[in-house]
Amino acid sequence: MATKLSKLISIFFILLSFSTTQVLSVVSEECEADSEDSCNNKSKALPLKIIAIVSILVTSMIGVCLPLVTRSVPALSPDKSLFVIVKSFAAGIILATGFMHVLPDSFDMLSSSCLKENPWHKFPFSGFVAMLSAILTLMVDSLATSFYSKQNKGGIVIPEGAAAAAAQGDQEMAVGNLHGHHHGSISMKDGVEGAQLLRYRVIAMVLELGIIVHSIVIGISLGASNNTCSIKGLVAALCFHQMFEGMGLGGCILQAEYKLLKKAVMAFFFSVTTPFGIALGIGLASTYKENSPRALITVGLLNASSAGLLIYMALVDLLASDFMGPKLQGSVKLQVKSYMAVLFSHG
């Protein structure tokens, strides 16, 4: 099942890149741009874009792999407080990306003076699409969890005594019953913890999909731009965001307990998406006009849908699931530290 989902994500990624290429390569009537801007310099912008590809690739790999390679470090294992605090900080970065960067960009694009008054200035398309995206993400999240649960329910039967003991929190009795009925071949993960493991896997898949959409749009925008003043600042910001988005995704992948190959594939897709988008943007630089109506509408709607997905994932599947979970509910001190980490991530 996990393999099928990864294939679907791969197909979606390829189709998105092709469709975006086709849409952005169509030159329509343009809004007049400030061509005399001293920051617009194609020859100077290209080296900056090459630096951006390398630096973002490296920081993305570091971010997504850090939780995976530090598993052997006791202080950074998923059941430790430090891991929860770092994951909360990374989730805050993802939330801030949706609310403070992607969604405002969508509002700016879809309310641009380059677009016709009717309908773009008469209806809040950005907020509407972001809302639909969040609801759609909820549907995918819920249906995928149900499908996963049905696919994995058939192989294991848990004795009623063990399930009851686990529900009451008496894990030792539950494990004892499980070993008694199955001669030590089944662990608690197959029962109560198995459902949580399925949730982690769905969360990792949906979050990866959302970040891929957001990253390729940002990459194309950066790659197609020749504004050296904006590129310098954007590269630094993207490196920071990619590292901590990667840490959030890496933490989810770690908790999902995928096999090594699956972890490597998911880490690879996350790491190369933004650099691929930049390279695609460089190729489209001669035909892509960022102020053209087609570009504004396409990128604006993609940003809005990406924002809705990222906001839902950050609030519901990352922050709410951790803060309402037994570990944080059992420690007010750890809750306060995690809240501070979320707030600091917005700074």
Image (spheres, helix red, strand yellow):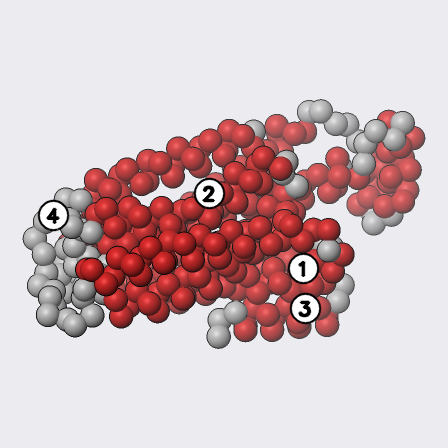
Q: Residues within 10 Å of mark 4 (few under 14, many from 20)?
A: some
Q: Is mark 2 on a helix, strand or loop?
A: helix
Image quarter for residue 310? Answer: bottom left
Label 3 to label 4, Cα distance in Å?
Answer: 52 Å
Q: Name the residue under label 1.
A: 83
Q: What residue type is labelled 1?
A: Phe
Please say if the residues under marks 2 and 3 sit with CB atoms less than 8 Å apart: no
Q: Which of marks 3 and 4 is in front?
A: 4
- At 68% from the left and 68% from the top, the residue drawn is 335
| Nearest to N terminus: mark 2 or mark 4 | 4
Label 2 to label 3, Cα distance in Å?
Answer: 32 Å
Label 3 to label 1, Cα distance in Å?
Answer: 13 Å
Q: Mark 4 points at which residue?
A: 27
Residue 303 at what x, y percent from top left?
33, 55
Whether residue 217 is situated above or below residue 98 in the rendered picture: above
Q: How crowded is mark 3: few (under 14 residues within 10 Å), some or many (20 or more)?
A: many
Q: Where the N terminus falls, by quadrant?
A: top right
Label 2 to label 4, Cα distance in Å?
Answer: 30 Å
* 283 left or right, relative to 161: left
- At 52% from the left and 69% from the top, the residue drawn is 345
- At 54% from the left and 55% from the top, the residue drawn is 62
Q: Which amino acid does label 2 sit on?
A: Phe
Q: Which amino acid does label 4 sit on?
A: Val
Residue 70 at what x, y percent from top left?
67, 53
Q: Which mark is residue 269?
A: 2
Please say if the residues under marks 3 and 4 sit with CB atoms less than 8 Å apart: no
Label 1 to label 2, Cα distance in Å?
Answer: 23 Å
Q: Residue 335 carries which label?
A: 3
Q: Is mark 4 on a helix, strand or loop?
A: loop
Q: Which amino acid does label 3 sit on?
A: Gln
Residue 321 at what x, y percent from top left?
62, 55
Q: What element carries label 3?
A: helix
